[in-house]
């Protein structure tokens, strides 16, 4: 047998990188933790599921169609998005979830020696993709739970290629209003790409919350990420997209993997965009869930943060990873936040009322 | 020399006594080149001589090994790497003798003798290079000058910062001045060494700095094993508890390691300032620090990830202990029983030592099962009791059924299970302690 020289084959930045281990499938977890029912409040999934129009589209799918390649560049979805936002279809790139488009952007703009700038306590994938690609991720501490615009600008140098801003931020729910975003974009003045990750865009009801897509004409260095995993309930199909200036998207397209988005996902996404009612129903449910939960958490005397998005943060008087284990035995799955650099905090997705009650009840039990 | 000094040099050589001088010259020259002073370089050379002579006796002259010297900043590490399939691993037992076959003759126990010359000695299994013996000799540092320490009063505001060398030295002095010996590691008494320890990347430090730049407190951490990081502190100097310094220091430490490959954070030197709610108690071990003085050492832990659960092996004699611990700590484990039921076993067991002479401590780990395990263990205990090593531990990795099956041998030799270290190995590790330390 030949000797595998992994040591010589693997770049140092990959050796240093720790693979992310996703949680086991629900039936395995339920067996492991001995619970009969599991409320998934860890991934910010939409408790209402996909919009009715998307469900209908999915039910129309003929299984024999699985033999046919999907549209390699999500042709009809890009047409639909272009019509919706008044842009050119070529200003959109669709990926296998928004995670994939993060990779496209970093690969398109960064090479060895370059860096990206983001926050320390935000969605981890910007940092991960940069690091396992051999690109430095400069992390700027949040200020008052919010992305620190001045701090980020101060960390930039001539090798900074991309700023990643999660707006609203996952997990803190804070956001930059339009004035602050414009001020930041003006200060960057086109020297770097600015990515606004708007994964939770459709959940935000605040008037001063900016719509990144509307700013694309004024700021050609702006790229906006959106996803169908959250509001549109298509997380299991993995589909998300980016929008940007034609020239910018033309560059990103060079690093884009075509055919990575399956037919079901594309068809369901096209249908989902028509269902305005789904957004209102989801927002109503999230509002009610947050109100209920906030009251329960306040009653328990627990510090909590309820910003934008479909989740809340709760600070516990115990290790969050211990709380995860204890809550799992009671059939409630939350996100422990040590990995977000928020030790002893948990993030709980807003679910149906029954799930919120189950969570509140389980929390009381583990805090006794 | 400066930047042109290599961090690592190696020598490939046959296990033949005629090369002994070549190996000792290599060890001595590289030790000096990497910054050890004459006395320390000599001690490392003597340890190297013992090991090589010992390995020559245990191996075959046509067997090739690699000797590797590495500059660790505050120490020099010497590794003896050999090919497992060729080498007589049985020789790794401390009880193994070469020429006389008389296990009671301490003079012939090269490994034990070598361990006395160095600060660190352990067996390591490197997937790339195979098994090896590792010697660590630390550099000598001057005792701190009688510098007067600044008076530090309570701060009103603070921020967390990474220290430069001078603040690091001051922090080390403050820790030694404000805390009893058993709450920090010996090296903290040598400020220059602390600077090199942090510069090596093996240790991390964050300080809480007051509004006037005064050092209000700090926390230290280091990697302990594959998936475990150990923290020291938090240390606070005349600060109010309600300002949240401890919590911020712990949070900053966790923030630094949260997205690394570490699975758990362990704390064996908790100060009274360790904030409640951040750690879980794994249990207590008793450490003999000086003759007749035994101190309980609580062990705290927190997981850095969501626990995925795992399968572990357990001997029936350990099952109750494990179930009680897992239930107390809310760890879900699929426990499978493992025991010997008359099946054939290899004749000879092998236990690898990890010496910590500063703490008069040794930890044994099983690297090979054998029918002689109980007798071998008894022999180890006998020899170690004759040494100045009253704190004897034995760790078994519950990922391995054969290790779990060693439980009766441990219990019958005066060991008792003290705690479970989640994912301390390939799966959870059970730490047994010999009653000598109780």
Image (tube, coloured by chain):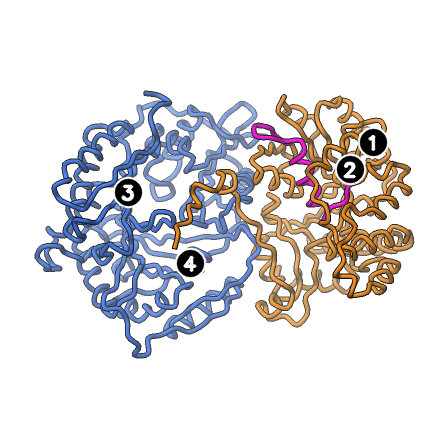
Is the Cβ of the residue at disc 3 closer than 8 Å to that at disc 4? Answer: no
Inter-mark Cα distance, 1 to 2? 8 Å
The subunit letter for the residue under badge 3 reads B
* Residue A191 in the image, given as x and y percentages of width and height: 71, 22
Q: Which residue is mark 1?
A: A216
Inter-mark Cα distance, 4 to 1? 58 Å
* Residue B378 in the image, given as x and y percentages of width and height: 21, 65
Label 1 and label 2 in one chain: yes
Q: State the residue at coordinates (63%, 63%).
A: A25
Mark on residue B283? 4
Q: Which residues are magenta?
A: A93-116
Q: In the visual, does B425 lie left or right of A324?
A: left
Inter-mark Cα distance, 3 to 2? 52 Å
Outermost left residue: B100
Mark on residue B416? none
**Chain displayed in orange:** A
């Amino acid at each position: 047998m030949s000797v595998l020289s992994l040591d010589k084959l693997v770049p140092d930045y990959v050796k240093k990188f720790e693979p992310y281990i996703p949680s086991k499938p629900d039936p395995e977890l339920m067996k492991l933790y001995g619970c009969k029912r599991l409320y998934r409040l860890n991934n910010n999934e939409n408790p209402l599921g996909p919009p009715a129009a998307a469900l209908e589209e999915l039910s129309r799918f003929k299984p024999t169609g699985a033999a046919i390649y999907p549209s390699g560049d999500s042709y009809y979805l890009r047409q639909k998005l272009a019509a919706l936002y008044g842009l050119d279809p070529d200003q959109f790139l669709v990926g296998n979830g928004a995670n994939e488009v993060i990779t496209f952007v970093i690969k398109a703009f960064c090479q060895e020696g370059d860096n990206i700038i983001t926050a320390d306590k935000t969605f981890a994938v910007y940092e991960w993709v940069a690091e396992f690609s051999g690109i430095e991720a400069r992390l700027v501490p949040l200020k008052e739970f919010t992305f620190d615009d001045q701090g980020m600008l101060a960390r930039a140098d001539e090798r900074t290629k991309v700023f990643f801003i999660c707006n609203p931020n996952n997990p803190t729910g804070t956001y930059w209003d339009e004035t602050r975003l414009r001020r930041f974009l003006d200060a960057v003045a086109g020297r770097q790409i600015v990515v606004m990750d708007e994964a939770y865009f459709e959940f935000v009801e605040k008037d001063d919350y900016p719509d990144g897509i509307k700013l694309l004409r004024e700021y050609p260095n702006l790229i906006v990420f959106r996803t169908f995993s959250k509001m549109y309930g298509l997380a299991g199909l993995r589909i998300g997209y980016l929008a940007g200036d034609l020239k910018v998207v033309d560059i990103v397209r060079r690093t884009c993997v075509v055919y990575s988005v399956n037919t079901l996902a594309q068809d369901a996404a096209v249908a989902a965009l028509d269902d305005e009612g789904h957004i209102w129903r989801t927002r109503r449910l999230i509002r009610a869930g947050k109100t209920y939960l906030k009251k329960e958490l306040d009653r328990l005397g627990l510090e909590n943060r309820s910003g934008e998005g479909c989740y809340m943060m709760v600070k516990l008087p115990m290790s969050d990873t211990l709380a995860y284990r204890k809550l799992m035995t009671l059939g409630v799955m939350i996100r422990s936040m040590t990995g977000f650099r928020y030790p002893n905090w948990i993030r709980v997705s807003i679910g149906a009322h029954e799930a919120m009650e189950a969570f509140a009840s389980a929390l009381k039990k583990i805090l006794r | 020399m400066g930047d042109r000094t290599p961090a690592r040099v190696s020598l490939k050589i046959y296990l033949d006594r005629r090369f002994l001088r070549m190996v000792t010259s290599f060890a001595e020259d590289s030790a000096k080149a990497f910054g050890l002073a004459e006395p320390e370089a000599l001690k490392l050379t003597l340890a190297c001589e013992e090991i090589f002579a010992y390995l020559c006796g245990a191996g075959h002259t046509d067997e090739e090994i690699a000797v590797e010297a590495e500059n660790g900043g505050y120490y020099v590490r010497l590794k003896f790497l050999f090919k497992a399939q060729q080498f007589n691993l049985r020789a790794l037992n401390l009880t193994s003798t070469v020429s006389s076959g008389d296990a009671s003759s301490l003079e012939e126990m090269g490994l034990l003798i070598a361990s006395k010359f160095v600060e660190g000695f352990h067996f390591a299994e490197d997937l790339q290079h195979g098994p090896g013996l590792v010697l660590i000799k630390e550099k000598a540092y001057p005792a701190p000058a009688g510098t007067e320490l600044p008076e530090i009063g309570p701060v009103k505001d603070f921020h967390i910062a990474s220290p430069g060398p001078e603040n690091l030295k001051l922090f080390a002095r403050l820790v030694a001045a404000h805390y009893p010996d058993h709450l920090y590691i010996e090296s903290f008494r040598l400020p220059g060494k602390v600077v090199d320890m942090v510069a090596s990347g093996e240790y991390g430090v964050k300080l809480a700095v007051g509004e006037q730049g005064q050092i209000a407190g700090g926390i230290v951490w280091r990697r302990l094993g594959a998936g475990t990081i150990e923290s020291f502190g938090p240390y606070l100097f005349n600060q109010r508890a309600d300002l949240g310094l401890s919590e911020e220091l712990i949070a900053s430490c966790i923030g630094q390691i949260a997205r690394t490959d570490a699975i758990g954070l362990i704390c064996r030197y908790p100060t009274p300032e360790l904030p409640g709610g951040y750690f879980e108690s794994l249990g207590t071990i008793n450490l003999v620090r000086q003759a007749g003085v035994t101190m309980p050492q609580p062990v705290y832990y927190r997981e850095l990830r969501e626990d995925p659960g795992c399968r572990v092996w357990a001997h029936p004699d350990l099952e109750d202990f494990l179930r009680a611990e897992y239930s107390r700590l809310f760890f879900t484990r699929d426990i499978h029983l493992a025991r010997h039921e008359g099946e054939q076993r290899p004749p000879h067991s092998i236990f690898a030592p990890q010496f910590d002479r500063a703490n008069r401590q040794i930890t044994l780990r099983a690297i090979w099962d054998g029918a002689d395990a109980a007798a071998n263990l008894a022999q180890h205990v006998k020899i170690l009791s004759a040494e100045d090593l009253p704190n004897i531990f034995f760790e078994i990795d519950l990922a391995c059924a054969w290790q779990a099956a060693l439980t009766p041998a441990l219990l019958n030799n005066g060991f008792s299970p003290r705690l479970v270290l989640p994912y301390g190995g390939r799966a959870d590790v059970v730490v047994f302690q010999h009653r000598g330390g109780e």
